[in-house]
Image: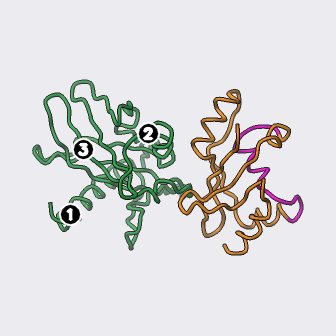
Chain colours: A orange, B green
Amino acid sequence: MEKILVDVGIQSSGRTFRLNPKSKQELANEFPHRNPISSIFVSDETKHDFENIHGSIYESILQILTDLPESKLKKIPFAIIDPVTHTELFNSEKPSVKKKQLIHR
Amino acid sequence: MSKKNNLYIGKAGQNVVMSEFLIRGYNAGIPEVDVGDDIFVVRDSDGDLQRIQVKTGKVVTKRNFFTAQFRIPLDQLRQPIEPQLIYALAFRDFANNNWQCFIIIERSRLNELNLINNIGTISNNHLQLYVRINRLNSTVICSGLDITEYLNNFSKWPQINH
């Protein structure tokens, strides 16, 4: 698998994350015995509190969405993208994108 | 059909779907400004909220089946916003003056069917659905895909007796 894409919807009090349908299908083919969840909402407050202690929350969100262990996920790059505007919110291959986007949002 | 007439038909579809939620014991309201959601459906006991977008299609009857077309904005379809948006596709049969049926499908599911199974066609930043329903066995086909499971599927809203 080349890359995992996560769709994000920006809301007034947080963000909703879900696997991009194509990535979801690729993961289902490659790792069939998992129990992924369809979407996860993270409030701005939760994100802020989590990142104050643990650093970026995106890896944890990816783990929940994919139900894959960290060891496997480390080998696959991922990006978080707004599917409407195609803005890249985060890219594990270019982590600096994250900061830039967050300031503008 | 004139734009003004379409407004009347759209409003009729919105009201007929709303009546289905009310008869099931759910509270329903229409947002003051029409910018996406058509109906808010609320379970009074705990405030659980669902957002419904109604699309009304004109039924064309053939011998053993009928069809209708629907247009859904792509920008709306791709959004992963919570609470989940649910599409209610209402089939209005003008020849017989009745509502034939409804397709009830979550936005995320329809988005998956489009991206993975190529359901519908994309035109002018809209997803166009051409839905065909067999009158004999009630199977629902769209772009060669069987979507019968979504026919009149109000199962998310079991009857509440107040």
Report the magenta residues as a range. A52-69
Disc 2 marks which amino acid? Asn
Q: Kindly indicate the quadrant of the structure image that contains residue A25.
A: top right
For image coordinates 44% across by 39% down, the residue present is B118
Looking at the rendered structure, the secondary structure element under dot 3 is strand
Residue behind mark 1: B8
Confirm whether circles 1 and 3 share one chain: yes
Q: Residue at x 70, y 27 (%)?
A: A33
Circle 1 packing at 10 Å, graded few (<14), some (14-19), many (20+), is: few
Q: Residue furthest right?
A: A53
A86, B24: nearer the viewer = A86
Q: Nearer the viewer, residue A52 or B129?
A: B129
Quadrant where the image shows the N terminus of chain B: bottom left
Decide whether the magenta segment is chiefly helix, strand or loop. Answer: helix
Return the disc, 1 or 2, that comes first in the chain's sequence.
1
**Which amino acid is tagged 1?**
Tyr
**Alpha carbons under labels 1 and 2: distance apart:** 31 Å
Q: Is B153 drawn above or below residue B63 in the view shown?
A: below
Give the x, y percent position of residue B137.
26, 24
Location of mark 2 (residue)? B118
Q: Which residue is mark 3?
A: B68
